Amino acid sequence: MAFHAQQAVEKAVNPLLIWLGRPFPPTHDLTQLVELLPRELSALAGHELTDLTVYAVPQRYPASSHDPMDLGSMPDWPEARNALDLATGFLDMVQERVRHASGLT
């Protein structure tokens, strides 16, 4: 569940960056990706969101600075639930911002 939460956030940030015309590196590191968002979005995302990076797949890109995933540990249920709550909150925020910017609200 925590892996899917990380992936959901990553898969929301990447197209958002494309929509905003902001280039981004091929990475699963949410800290790097969130820092590329406009200040109002990155501030709303909060630093806790970047904690989801530890649930990413092992880094596949040699240019990455580190591999944040400790494959020897798994999140417990409260950690997984927290990851899901963080991802859901972020996805709701992105959806609202895109709707507002597109004139759909």
Image: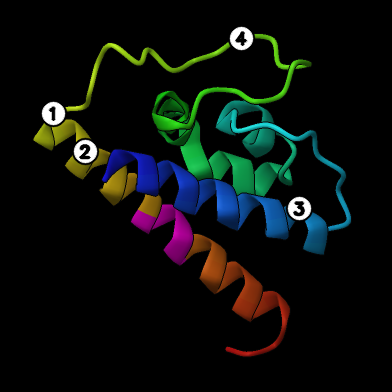
Q: Which residue is mark 4?
A: 66
- Marks 2 and 3 in Cβ contact (< 8 Å): no
Could you tell which of marks 2 and 3 lies nearer the N-terminus? 3
- Viewer-side residue, 21 vs 65: 65
Q: Which residue in the protein does label 3 denote?
A: 17
How many C-alpha atoms fall within 10 Å of the one at disc 1: few (<14), some, or many (≥20)? few
Q: Is residue 11 left or right of residue 74?
A: right
Residue drawn at x 45%, y 54% as measured from the top left: 90
Q: Earlier in the sequence, mark 4 or mark 2?
A: 4
> Mark 1: which secondary structure?
loop
- On residue 35, the disc is none
Q: Which residue is mark 1?
A: 76
Which comes before the other along the chain, label 3 or label 4? 3
User: How busy is the neighbourhood of tag 2: few (under 14 within 10 Å), some, or many (20 plus)?
Assistant: some
The CA span between labels 1 and 4 is 24 Å
Q: Residue at x 63, y 51 (%)?
A: 13
Question: Along the line of sight, which residue is nearer the eye, 33 or 47?
Answer: 33
Q: Compared with residue 96, is residue 72 higher up or lower down, i.e. above or below?
A: above
User: Who's the residue at 70% across and 59% down the image?
Assistant: 15
Asked if disc 1 and disc 3 are in contact, CB closer than 8 Å, the reply is no
Q: Main secondary structure of the magenta part?
A: helix
Q: Which residues are magenta?
A: 88-92
Q: Are marks 2 and 1 in contact (CB under 8 Å)?
A: yes
| Amino acid at pointer 2 | Ala
Amino acid, disc 3 = Leu
